[in-house]
Image (cartoon, rainbow, N blue to C red):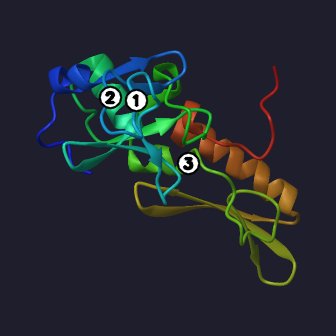
Amino acid sequence: MSAAKITQARLKELLDYDPETGVFTWKFQKTSAVKAGGVAGTLGTNGYWCIKIDRKRWLAHRLAWLFVYSKFPDGNLDHRDRDRLNNAITNLRRASVSQNTSNTERLQNNETGYRGVYKSGRISWMARIVVGGKRLYGGSFRTAKLAAKKYDEMASTYFGEFARLNFSASP
């Protein structure tokens, strides 16, 4: 899904985009199954909405960025609410790989119940975070909850608004 060979002008020639809902619709009848005004695209196997234009599949969130800002984003886009189908422009933001990864759910195989917490030996817990491909350790703790609090500190420091924390920040 390369950014080559599509322009904002071509995109706007074919599709309308609602920046509040993130939904693209066709401007004309494309096939007997695809009518003017019909929702453009399908759900891809990766969980993202994809739209086929000129025999090429495009990620809808990247097309939304092109539609609004007249160019593709440099690097990754992150869905603020983690919903891969919510392509409203206010839900999209530029992100580094680390920032994008930090805005994900806890891994399915995590047995501690906390992000960034790992069993270390028989009686201690370790806080760890990955930043720019490097593992950073926050120390060992008596309980998983203490390690999770340390992870939250580290995530807030390194990822700011992109951080997904174990415990909600106090108002």
Q: CA distance from mark 1 to mark 2?
A: 4 Å
Q: Which residue lies at the image location 48% right of the left edge and 26% below the top edge?
A: 23
Residue 102's label in the rendered image is 3
**Disc 1 to disc 2: CB gap under 8 Å:** yes
**Residue 99, position in %: x, y?**
48, 43
The one of 71 and 74 positioned closer to us in this rendering: 71
Residue 35's label in the rendered image is 1
Amino acid carrying mark 3 in the image: Ser
Q: Which residue lies at the image location 27% right of the left edge and 26% below the top edge?
A: 66
**Residue 162, position in %: x, y?**
55, 36
The one of 120 and 69 positioned closer to us in this rendering: 69
Residue at the limit of the structure toward the bottom, as seen here:
122
User: In the figure, 120 relative to 32: above or below?
Assistant: below
Res 9 → quadrant: top left
Label 1: how many Cα within 10 Å (few below 14, some 14–19, many 20+): some
**Residue 84, position in %: x, y?**
54, 42
Residue at the limit of the structure toward the front, as seen here:
32
Label 1: state its secondary structure: loop
Amino acid carrying mark 1 in the image: Lys
Residue 29's label in the rendered image is 2
Q: CA distance from mark 3 to mark 2?
A: 41 Å
